[in-house]
Image (cartoon, rainbow, N blue to C red):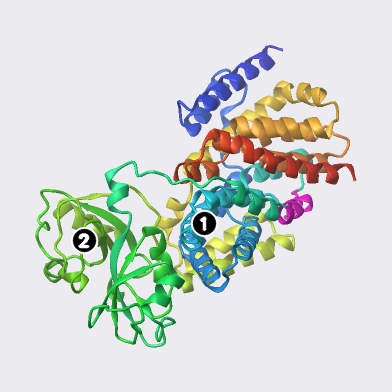
């Protein structure tokens, strides 16, 4: 009984700290494990073994795959193509939501949400709506899709590991596909409806950085075979959501100026749409000698004491000893009367530069430049995208025919490394270490809950009711996260008459992190850009939860 009381107190304190948000979740997890070890509730050997457990390794590999695919810019290119090909908003939304929902079964929902944020801005511009209409729906569908495979979300991986600990066998890869896939398909019309009901909100600019880097001026050459050759300036602007402010040779006089091979266009573009611009066939933004697979795109701020102040971009490039390319300059206050290279650099400007990380670091250090806030800006890389998707398909194929999921995803990552789509440094940077630590620590807490007998009390409270099992899993998921929900309620599911059906119910409920913004990282990613409130999540998230519950309950009783 003493052990049960100790574990219960630790669990309550940990939960209160998570809700208060005063400490980062991984720090709370580490502190929880330390207390459990000091009190002798779990052994150091057991704690270390759980940190190195199979679910933790699989999640790290999924993160690597997700980040690699995200970095290719393919989803942004897909969104641009759809908005250009289809003028009907509902068709575009249906295709995008279906793509996200299905892909989320094999990728991190957080990575997918990050990939869709630029597309939300593109669609909102083209359809004349606020991004508020699309950001929350994209996050919701990414989370909804991440439930029909055992590797699709961290809570499913926790249940995958718990099942092996209990029965000595691994769950099949598509164990949760029924009702998971049904939920994805049925939820698409509902999410589209929510996008119509969400209010039109314009998020105000809250800092000088946001205002000055709202748009960049960038320069691109048009090559032979390009998809915009023969089109007028007006047609390109309407199709690709950019503004062409200059064409060289010659100034723009009318929107019916036809673009030809060899033209240099000066484009005013948002950071979110640079990826799309780079993916247009025949549009060459960066000098090829300064852009390869290891190149990074970085925003740098011109400090008042920088030696670059007062020089033109042309003089800076010609005098530069750095292997970098200047892709753009903040458009605020700039007027174009010729090529981009003629612009004078001023204090407070922001440059968008491309190059290797060490070259950019040297450039910033010696020229008195400061890094701007982190923002995900990337160029479309078709080769890397094809290899990344092929590697993911290989992992899914291997897992589907019975190969261990860890081995299947490990093979896929090895392919990425062998083809140099991924390097070792980026591989480690792709892993969200705080999440990995938090999951490892909460698996340890789960072991303590089981060994203390607390799960037996919870199981007695549920009284074999699928409804109570779902509601309790849902409560923990939105209160302290999907990982904690799976850790607590997974062992309870094993005590039901049909443990497989019960574990599926827990998986569906633990992924229903829609009611609170802190229940899932995807919710937090879009909360600020969309100007959403806690009330928005409570109202619209509850609608989604009701749908998931109805489908899950029908699955459980039939």
For the residue pair 424 and 558, the one nearer the viewer reads as 558
Q: x, y (%) of residue 327?
A: 28, 66
The quadrant of the image that shows the N terminus is top right
User: For the point 39% across and 70% down, which residue is it?
Assistant: 278
For the residue pair 328 and 456, the one nearer the viewer reads as 328
Q: Quadrant of residue 556?
A: top right
* Residue that extends furthest to the top in the rendered view of this protein: 2
Q: x, y (%) of residue 39?
A: 57, 17
Q: Secondary structure at mark 1?
A: helix
130 vs 411: above or below: above
Q: Which range of residues does the magenta coloring cover?
A: 170-186
Q: Is residue 178 magenta?
A: yes
Asked whether residue 237 appears in the rendered view, the answer is: yes
Q: Is residue 441 magenta?
A: no
Residue denoted by label 2: 334
Q: In screen coordinates, is 489 left or right of 436?
A: right
User: For the point 72% across and 61% down, which residue is it?
Assistant: 400
Q: Which one is earlier in the sequence, the residue at label 1 or at label 2? A: 1
Residue denoted by label 1: 116
């Amino acid at each position: 009984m003493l052990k049960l009381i100790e574990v219960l107190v630790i669990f309550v304190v940990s939960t209160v700290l998570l809700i208060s948000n005063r400490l980062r979740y991984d720090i709370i997890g580490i502190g929880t494990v330390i207390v459990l070890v000091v009190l002798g509730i779990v052994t150091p050997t057991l704690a270390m073994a759980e940190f190195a457990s199979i679910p933790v390794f699989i999640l790290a590999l999924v993160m690597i795959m997700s980040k690699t695919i995200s970095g290719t810019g393919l989803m942004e290119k897909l969104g641009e193509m759809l908005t250009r090909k289809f003028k009907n908003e509902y068709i575009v939304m249906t295709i995008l939501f279906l793509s996200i929902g299905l892909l989320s079964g094999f990728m991190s929902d957080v990575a997918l949400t990050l990939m869709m944020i630029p597309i939300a801005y593109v669609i909102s511009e083209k359809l004349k709506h606020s991004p508020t209409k699309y950001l929350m729906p994209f996050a919701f569908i990414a989370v909804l899709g991440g439930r029909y495979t055992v590797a699709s979300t961290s809570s499913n991986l926790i249940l995958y590991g718990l099942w092996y600990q209990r029965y000595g066998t691994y769950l099949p890869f598509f164990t949760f596909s029924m009702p998971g896939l049904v939920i994805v398909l049925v939820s698409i019309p509902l999410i589209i409806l929510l996008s119509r009901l969400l209010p039109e909100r314009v998020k105000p600019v809250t800092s000088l950085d946001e205002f000055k880097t709202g748009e960049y001026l960038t320069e691109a050459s048009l090559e032979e075979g390009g998809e915009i050759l023969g089109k007028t300036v007006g047609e390109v602007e309407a199709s690709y959501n950019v503004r062409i402010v200059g064409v060289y040779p010659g100034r723009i006089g009318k929107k019916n100026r036809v673009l030809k091979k060899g033209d240099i266009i000066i484009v005013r573009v948002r950071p979110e749409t640079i990826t799309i611009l780079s993916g247009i066939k025949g549009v060459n933004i960066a000098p090829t000698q300064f852009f390869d697979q290891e190149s990074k795109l970085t925003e740098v701020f011109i400090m008042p004491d920088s030696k670059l102040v007062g020089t033109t971009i042309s003089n800076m490039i010609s005098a530069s000893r750095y292997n970098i390319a200047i892709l753009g300059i903040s458009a605020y206050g700039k007027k174009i009367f010729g090529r981009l290279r003629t612009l004078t650099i001023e204090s407070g400007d922001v440059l968008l530069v491309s190059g290797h990380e060490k070259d950019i670091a040297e450039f910033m250090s010696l020229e008195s430049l400061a890094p701007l806030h982190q923002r995900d800006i990337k160029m479309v890389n078709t080769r890397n995208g094809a290899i990344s998707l092929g590697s993911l398909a290989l992992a899914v194929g291997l897992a589907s025919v019975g190969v261990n999921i860890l081995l299947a995803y490990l093979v896929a990552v090895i392919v990425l490394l062998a083809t140099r789509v991924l390097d070792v440094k980026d591989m480690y940077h792709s892993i969200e270490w705080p999440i990995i630590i938090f999951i490892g620590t909460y698996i340890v807490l789960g072991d303590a809950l089981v060994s203390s007998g607390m799960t037996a009390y919870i199981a007695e409270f549920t009284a074999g009711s699928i409804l109570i099992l779902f509601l309790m899993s849902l409560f923990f998921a939105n209160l302290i996260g999907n990982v904690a929900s799976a850790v607590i309620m997974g062992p309870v599911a094993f005590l039901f008459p049909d443990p497989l059906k019960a574990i599926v119910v827990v998986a569906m409920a633990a992924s229903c992190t829609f009611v609170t913004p802190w229940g899932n990282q995807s919710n937090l990613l879009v909360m600020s850009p969309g100007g959403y409130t806690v009330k928005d999540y409570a109202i619209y998230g509850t609608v989604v939860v009701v749908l998931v519950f109805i489908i899950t309950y029908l699955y459980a009783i039939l």
